[in-house]
Image (cartoon, rainbow, N blue to C red):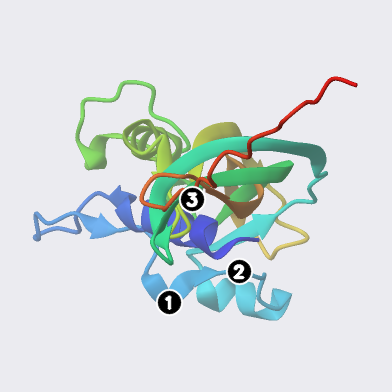
Amino acid sequence: MKRTHITYLKDLIGTIMKSPIPPSTDLVRLIPEDKIFEAHPREDKFQENAPFCVINHTPITPILDGRRWQKLSSVEISGVKNLRYLRRHFSQEFRYSLNFWFDDPTQSLLSIGDFSGRADDSGILDQSLIYIAKHKRFVTPQGVTVEVRPGRAALVSDPEEKKTLYKIFVEIVFKDGVFETELVPTLAGGTLEVESPIEVVVREL
């Protein structure tokens, strides 16, 4: 897991809303902030926590790269301008599954299929896709541009194993990697010292 990915996913989960509870007309956040977990609670706690969401991380396979991936802003060190690059040692695709658990599958459908633009007229997948469409990439504090795309989604019911709970899962994929900042000094801003030419005398014998 990467902290920037988790922050993105928690922000996404926080934007998913459900229909207001009459007589209120205000949309209700589907999953409270304290019901977003990075590890599944004990099974005997599932029922009391529902509805809740678990951010599940699947294994990754790093692929050797080594290329300069991205140019950053230059810096000046000891009066010498240095170009900065991000060298990507490994490319990685991080795949997360957002597991939404409910005791009633009608609380929020996976996808209504006729999105009108209102949060109370769409399912979890619809709202997740809209969020990703508006946030297809982001830049980390280190300057790395990370691309985001959706994966699979489904409604799963397993009442016997999870005490009549239903799960909706949505996969989110981050195109990222292992990066290192590389500095390349230039002559800009520096002083170039040129020695006087040496006279070479050739005598004929």
Tell me: 46 left or right of 81: right
Q: Amino acid at mark 1?
A: Asp
**Farthest residue toward the front?**
205
Q: Nearer the viewer, mark 1 or mark 3?
A: 3
Residue found 78% across the figure and 61% down from its top? 161
Residue 165 drawn at (x, y percent): 61, 59
Residue ID for mark 2: 38
Mark 3 to mark 2 CA distance (whole Å): 59 Å
Residue 153 drawn at (x, y percent): 59, 35
> How many neighbours does mark 3 have within 10 angstroms: few (below 14), some (14-19), or many (20 or more)?
few
Tell me: 11 left or right of 39: left
Residue found 38% across the figure and 22% down from its top? 113
Residue found 40% across the figure and 49% down from its top? 74
Q: Is residue 20 visible?
A: yes
- N-terminal-most mark, 1 or 3: 1
Question: For residue 193, which numbered disc appears in the image?
Answer: 3
Q: Secondary structure at mark 1?
A: helix
* Foreground of the two, 10 or 65: 65
Q: Amino acid at mark 3?
A: Glu
Q: Amino acid at mark 2?
A: Glu
Mark 1 to mark 3 CA distance (whole Å): 64 Å
Residue ID for mark 1: 34
Q: Quadrant of the N terminus?
A: bottom right
Question: For residue 157, which numbered disc appears in the image?
Answer: none
Residue 204 drawn at (x, y percent): 84, 20
